[in-house]
Amino acid sequence: MVEFEIKYSQTLAAQGITTPEQVRSLFAQATADFDAQISIDAVELLWEDLHQRWLGRKSGWLTKISDNWLKPASQELKRTVGQELNRLKAHVESGLEARHAAIESGPEPTVAAKDRIDLSLPGVIRPIGTHHLVRTVIQEIEDIFVSIGFSIVEGPEIETPYYNFEALNIPEHHPVREDMDTFYLDLPKGAPGPLLLRTHTSPVQIHTMEKRQPPVRVIVPGKVYRRDNPDATHSFMFHQIEGLAVDTDITFCDFTGTIEYFVKQFFGESVKTRFRPSYFPFTEPSVEFDVSCIFCGGSGAAASGGTCGKCKGAGWIELFGAGMVDPAVYGFVNYDASKVSGFAFGMGMDRLAMLKYGIDDLQVFFQSDVRFLRQFP
Ligand code: DAH
């Protein structure tokens, strides 16, 4: 196009054009030049430029053709040049007009309007979900214990009776096995030994002590299983967190101090605590640990009058079992019972979550009902 532009400023004689055929060929090239330009310049602003370039009164190319090709043309060529110029002018005018009309009626959409992206619209907000309340409570408990030097370990949910019972000082015919009736796996004939779903997280005490020498300070969150029928406080699967601290100089005071610290961190400074004597085969002495009722503040009376439904008027709520590790247990893990001492505890995390967040039905934790889950974002 640029090379061709030069020709509009040169006379025919200067271009060596002497025959009508050459004139027609030159105009054919000029026509093609225009066609090429109009097919590229599609936008309105450029249409103005194009119009000016070809039809501009003073220095438009058609004026130049008229001045440089037509006016100085020889007699023989003048007729042909005049005819060709008129044809080209009509072609340019109608071409520019058609393009103008097309622009007026809106730009040719290159992307269908429906497919166009409106960047000013708000984005699609996808809910990313949150932790389940049980998970949140596990996290809260872990944070408290980690802050005082405990580390977190986990263990298998499928156990041998040895880890779940015997090594915890619960021999085969011990009556507490009654309370922990569980699910045994259906194993193929000839498979070694029975396997069961662990009834508590306590077997991980044994796994940990088998692997590590004192000092040991661990907590063990996890799922446990019992053959219980589901109701507001029972489920065949629930969550426990086990704690174990063993060292050369751990006393009952370390034990009570640690437990009280945890409970006050978890429920708040104002709760009162108490220990009651209890029995577990793997601790001696054993305790049951209570807190003052979170719902009635320990008074035993409901705000609406009458007795508090949560603690049944007792003012205390039983939280979990604990104790000093029974020396018999050290025998199973080759610790020297004359040199080490320690404490252990095992809490139901679902129960702690229910107490802290005022939930009165354990089953809601396992029903995946979003109306419940959304209340704990
Ligand atoms: N394993 C016991 C249970 O599931 C809870 C427990 C009690 C764990 C006392 C302990 C403990 O570590 O010292 O009922």
Image: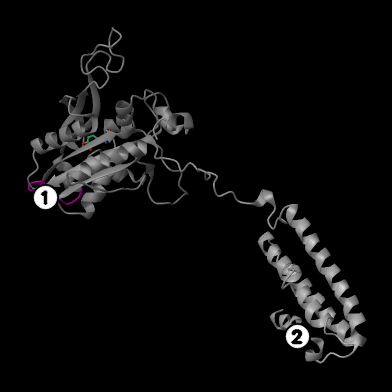
**Between 266 and 88, the one nearer to me in the picture:** 88
Q: Which residue is mark 1?
A: 336
Quarter where residue 12 is shown: bottom right
**Between 28 and 141, the one nearer to me in the picture:** 28
Name the residue at 20% across, 29% down: 279
Query: Is 231 situated above or below 205?
Result: above
Quarter where residue 170 is shown: top left
Task: Give x and y (percent) for residue 39.
Answer: 75, 68
Give ligand 1's quarter of the image.
top left
Whether label 2 lies within 8 Å of ligand 1 gets the answer no
**In which quadrant will I find the N terminus?**
bottom right
Q: Give the extent of the magenta segment.
A: 333-340
What amino acid is labelled 2 in the image?
Gln
Task: Give x and y (percent) for residue 82.
Answer: 89, 77
**Between 328 and 89, the one nearer to me in the picture:** 89
Query: For the residues carrying marks 2 and 1, which lies nearer the camera in this image?
Result: 2
Tell whether label 1 touches label 2 (CB within 8 Å).
no
Name the residue at 28% across, 11% down: 303
Left or right relative to 60: residue 330: left
Cα separation, mark 2 vs mark 1, equals 113 Å
Left or right relative to 368: residue 142: left
Name the residue at 32% across, 29% down: 351
Left or right relative to 108: residue 263: left
Left or right relative to 305: residue 25: right
**Which mark is drawn over residue 10?**
2
